[in-house]
Image: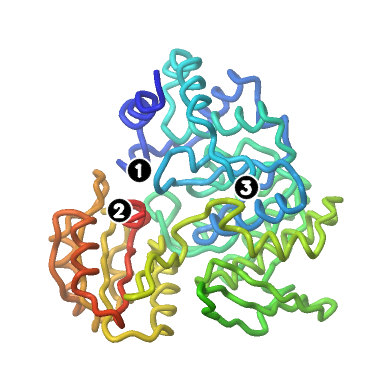
Amino acid sequence: MNYKQTLDYLYSALPMFYRIGAAAYKADLNNTIKICNLLNNPQNNFKSIHIAGTNGKGSVSHFIASVLQERGLNVGLYTSPHFKDFRERIKINGKDIPKKYVSTFVSKYQKEFEKINPSFFEMTVGMAFNYFSDKKVDIAVIETGLGGRLDSTNIITPILSVITNISFDHMNLLGETLEKIAFEKAGIIKSNVPVVIGESHKQTNQIFKDQAKHNNSSIFFADKNYCVLDVDIENKGKKDLFLNIERKKDSSIRKLKSPLTGLYQRKNLLTVLQSIDLLNEQGMKIKETHIVKGISRVIENTGIMGRWQMLSKSPLVVCDMGHNEDGIRQVVAQIATCKYKQLHFVIGMVNDKDIDSILKLLPQQAIYYFCKADMPRGLDASALQAKAATFGLSGKTYSSVKKAFNTAKNYADKKDFVFVGGSTFIVAEIL
């Protein structure tokens, strides 16, 4: 099979969560274990960092990978989903896995894998681990796909576990309460492996403490050890986020610049700094210059996309992959800080989200362009429009994401703001 034929096979023959939702979710690790046994357990051949969380885990994964690259290490990075090309999911030092490797891997193991009957994600995890092992990475940053305890990535024994935050998402699979969701995320905590919790929360702190104690793991809450003193966004041809962050134990202050300008990155960077402290305690020898350069070069080092990404300045066009209640709340808060004449909001959602909790947060003064991502899980644009109307949100429906986006841009004045979001897959089609 060539690369295109391989992708057609992966997308059509294997159940994919991003296309069909819960039906593709395997509530155990059996298939992943079988796949990795077949591959001679490549996940045991490199060090790893395991990152879970409701929001922010992708940004934190990319930041940490970028810092480790500046340290001079050969760094694997596994994330999901992808925006433009499947190969974005599996990278070494910011370079996508080669097309030939993907095709060869699938062709070589196709018959054996079909006996196991894996999901798309399970096979992808096996491919990532095999690639990182073959290329002898020094360390791999591994982002969970969904949850933690039963996530396919959870067969690794990392040197550090990281849980960014807990909020409501995928409740049909992870539980209806923050406590239940936290329990699933806490499943990545391993015996005698330190764990970083990015955001402390009175409803979930004890769950993480109990799990850490059970595993004899030291636990660190990033927001109790670090704090952002001030933050600013400057525009000198290109926007950057400038932060002064204090480490509380010695009152030392770091001055950082991030090309990812979502204000929610403040929380993510606290998690990153706490994680780096623990990596240094394990002898990683990450210097201040590695941290500063790694954060400032995260886009060029890792190719991260879709996080408060500016696509145009006049009119201002921004996309963001925030797709649950907490993510949308952060997005709306940042939109409120922007100056514009009229807000145009291109929006689409998937049908298994808590739609009401998101729509109630959106600004009523915006003009909405309702659309559906080109995937089975996409919520019908008319259904979204009708539901939005009950929250005082008005606009027209469009037959495709592209038409909605182009119409918004055509209607927008140079001083207007066009925002694209509501779903990772809406952003993916724009990018």
First of labels 3, 2 by sequence position:
3
Residue 173 point in image, percent of width and height = 41, 49
Label 1 Cα crowd, 10 Å radius (few <14 / some 14-19 / many 20+): some
- Most distant residue in the front direction: 237
Residue 214 point in image, percent of width and height = 72, 50
Image quadrant where one finds the N terminus: top left
Q: How is the image coloured?
A: rainbow
Residue 396 point in image, percent of width and height = 13, 68
Q: Are marks 3 and 2 in contact (CB under 8 Å)?
A: no
At x 38%, y 76%, the residue is 332
At x 70%, y 39%, the residue is 157
Q: Which residue is label 2 attached to?
A: 352
> Residue type at mark 1?
Ala
Position of residue 323 in the picture relative to residue 395 (left or right): right
Label 3 Cα crowd, 10 Å radius (few <14 / some 14-19 / many 20+): many
At x 65%, y 51%, the residue is 65
Label 2 Cα crowd, 10 Å radius (few <14 / some 14-19 / many 20+): some
Instruction: State the image quarter where residue 236 is shown.
Output: bottom right
Position of residue 202 in the picture relative to residue 17 (left or right): right
Query: What's the distance in space between the residues labelled 2 and 1, CA to CA?
Result: 9 Å
Query: What's the distance in space between the residues labelled 1 and 3, CA to CA?
Result: 21 Å
> Residue type at mark 3?
Ile
Residue 376 point in image, percent of width and height = 24, 44
